[in-house]
Amino acid sequence: MTKIGYIVGSISSTSLNRTLAEALAKLAPEGVEFEEIAIKDLPFYSADYDAEFPQVGTDFKNHIESVDGIVIVTPEYNRSIPGVLKNAIEWASRPYGSFSFGGKPVAVLGGSPGAIGTAAAQQHLKAVLSHVNAIVMGQPEGFVQVAPGLITDDREITNEGTKAFLQSYLDAFLGLVARVEKANA
Ligand code: FNR
């Protein structure tokens, strides 16, 4: 069984990026399991926590380290990534010297009602992920314009072109995960 974690870069109760993440999970082939790595309970990171790292931070780091690959599905806020997502990456990067994303295959995906589909945020996110030593999938890039009705309540994708793209995006990522697994064997 291949375990893929997903992180949603929004804590909105109506997040369209959550629906996108859940729709992607539905495209997973047999033998691949998706599970959310939640960020909403993480407090604001401070270096004060390093001396006595809280359980919520340790649990978050352990969850990241326990999966074979991670898809980060994020909105764009003000042409960058939401603060809640950056905060979560701070937690995963500490205490000093313990990068939970290190050596982990990570794909970046995002949806927005606007035409550029989070492209600016993804550039920033990829730079941050490189710093914390993740193995970031460069291509394909995943910019999704989420028009009303694109994703149903059952997390089905109604546009065949978008569905085919997301399937090929997921296949490419699972290929990267398999290559990393083989290299580490
Ligand atoms: C946005 N939105 C937005 N969209 C975009 O394409 N580029 C941007 O820079 C921004 N900036 C931005 C800032 C803030 C503070 C908010 C609240 C929103 C719109 C955004 O794409 C839209 O609200 C999405 O629905 C957010 O994703 P979730 O939270 O629904 O997953």
Image (cartoon, rainbow, N blue to C red):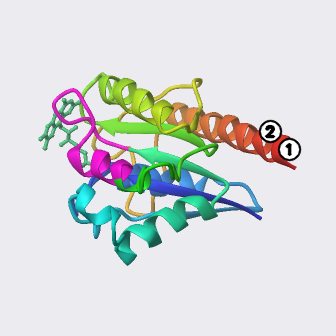
Residue 143 can be seen in this image: no
**Total number of numbered discs in the rendering:** 2
Of the pair 3 and 30, the residue shown nearer to us: 3
Task: For the residues labelled 2 and 1, say whether their Cβ atoms are less than 8 Å apart.
Answer: yes
Residue at the (55%, 37%) spot, across then down: 133
Residue at the (46%, 32%) spot, across then down: 131
Identify residue for label 2. Answer: 179
Within-10-Å neighbours for mark 2: few <14, some 14–19, many 20+: few
Identify residue for label 1. Answer: 182
Q: Is residue 140 above or below residue 91?
A: above
Magenta span has 51? no
In the image, taking residue 44 as reference, residue 7 lies left or right, namely right
Of the pair 115 and 174, the residue shown nearer to us: 174
Mark 2 secondary-structure assignment: helix
Mark 1 secondary-structure assignment: helix
Residue at the (56%, 39%) spot, across then down: 134
